[in-house]
Image: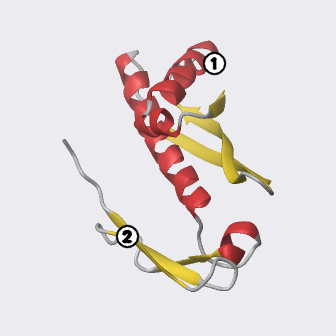
Amino acid sequence: MLHRNASAEWRGNLKLGGGTVSTASGALDECLFGFRTRFENDPGTNPEELIAAAHAACFSMQLSDLLSKEGYSPERLDVQAQVSVSVDEVAGATIKTSDLTVHAKAPGLEPEILDKVARDASRDCPVSRALNLEISVIATVV
């Protein structure tokens, strides 16, 4: 079993406090986050942005693997993930959807094949399974 580690430190209350997030690999090193980076547009990251990044990365790897198994050689997969958050006075913030968009370049790849394989990848990538939420995918051959 693989283990991946990250840590966060938070100081202060929700609206005025702030924190940092780091990964054991060093890819993130004390990246700032807080209420304003999460719910407004201040510089820094937030949990939803990190989930979107993880989902885009995981999906791209899963799609590459599935395309290869179908006999295609992906040259490039450009993936964007948009995580949508609903904020409710009672329930608080809830991640509702993750919308994936991919532009795929692979010799001989037909749009119908890409659509099917992209749907499979969006269902089967480990981050999709962990999120357990509504996922949409739009796939385009370039």
| Percent x, y of residue 117 | 51, 20
Which residue is at the front of the view, 74 or 107? Answer: 74
Q: Residue at x 53, y 29 (%)?
A: 122
Q: Is residue 7 left or right of residue 32?
A: left
Outermost residue to the right: 89
Does residue 6 sit above or below 132 in this rendering? below
> On residue 111, which mark appears?
1
> On residue 83, which mark appears?
none
- Pointer 2: residues within 10 angstroms few (<14), some, or many (20+)? few
Q: Secondary structure at mark 1?
A: helix
Colour scheme in use: secondary structure
| Percent x, y of residue 26 | 33, 72
Q: Is residue 23 left or right of residue 93?
A: left
Query: Looking at the picture, which amino acid does disc 1 mark?
Result: Pro
Query: Looking at the picture, which amino acid does disc 2 mark?
Result: Ser
Camera sees residue 106: no
Badge 2 or badge 1: first in the primary sequence: 2
Which residue is at the front of the view, 116 or 124? Answer: 124
Snapshot quadrant of residue 39: bottom right
Does residue 60 sit above or below 5 in this rendering? above
| Percent x, y of residue 33 | 58, 76
Q: Nearer the viewer, mark 2 or mark 1?
A: 2
Q: Residue at x 58, y 82 (%)?
A: 18
